[in-house]
Image: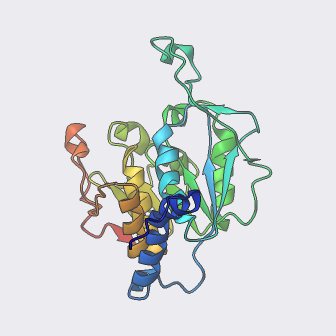
Amino acid sequence: MHLALPTTPHRRQRRWWSPLLGLLWACAAAAQNDGGAQQQQPPPKNFGVLLHRAFEVLDVFGPLSALGQLSSLHQMNLYMISETMDPVTVEPVSPAMNFKNSSFYPVVLPTHTYATAPEDMEVLIVPGGIWTWSPDLEATVAYVREAYPRLRYLVSICTGAAVVARAGVLDGRRATTNKAAWRGVVALGPRTEWVARARWVVDGNVWTSSGVSAGVDATLAFVAEVYGAAEAKAIADRMEYDRHLDPSWDPFADVFNVTGARAAGAGYRRDL
């Protein structure tokens, strides 16, 4: 006689958790053979994201989607940092830039200001967007300049490199940025070695990515470097994201006619 087990809410709940349990098991099993995950100190757990009106949505939430998956494997904290505690919209500051009078602008609530950001923050993510051309960025640039020496890593996404360059963090370093905005950004970093053909570039503890979607690839490369390749692969699989593993993959350098620097693959990273 065969007994059919009923599909109880408890059994359905176990099925719901099974993909996450599979991710945890895969990462734990593979990490034993993953030399890239070894650290002399524990991997970072305190992350900050710099927010400013008119930030690019994917620059923030692409990396946070990957890091959110990582937070199911490691205890992590997230700080959303802005100049004030006012809600931060992606709406352009100037009405002249809202060409169709749209109201398609999500809003994010900060958790901290520049003055109250926790001292234990280890990683700061600086997203891009049209905000990086705002005329009133003195306080933001000053905050990046002041916070950087305390960080273990700084990650710039897209035109966020413009603010990081103005803060002096990219002086003497190799970096990249959004190719559509290339000329405007590189003018702000005359002492930076800009890499024209790069999905992302690593120089010491500073990571810079090309435009918008490149931030996801840079973040997953960061996860692979700092937490282990197995965890980065498992996260990308969970996201159903087809990663670009080659930092010199950059067809957009040709699309936007960006030239004048060697490809990132030729010594794309430099450790200090």
Residue in front for this viewpoint, 238 or 149: 238
* Above or below for 14 versus 213: below
State whether residue 209 appears in this view.
no
* Above or below for 64 versus 162: below
**Residue 147, image x and y in percent?**
67, 58
Residue in front for this viewpoint, 152 or 62: 62
Q: Where on the picture, by quarter, is residue 187? A: top left
**Residue 242, image x and y in percent?**
29, 55
**Residue 25, image x and y in percent?**
46, 77
State whether residue 13 appears in this view.
yes
Taking the spot 52% from the left edge, 46% from the top edge, the residue there is 60
Residue in front for this viewpoint, 23 or 82: 23
Point out the image quarter for the N terminus: bottom left
* Above or below for 107 versus 68: above
Taking the spot 67% from the left edge, 67% from the top edge, the residue there is 150
The extreme front residue here reads: 1
Taking the spot 80% from the left edge, 52% from the top edge, the residue there is 116
The extreme right residue here reads: 116
Q: Where on the picture, by quarter, is residue 9? A: bottom right
Q: Is residue 136 left or right of residue 235?
A: right
Residue in front for this viewpoint, 139 or 156: 156
Taking the spot 40% from the left edge, 55% from the top edge, the residue there is 239
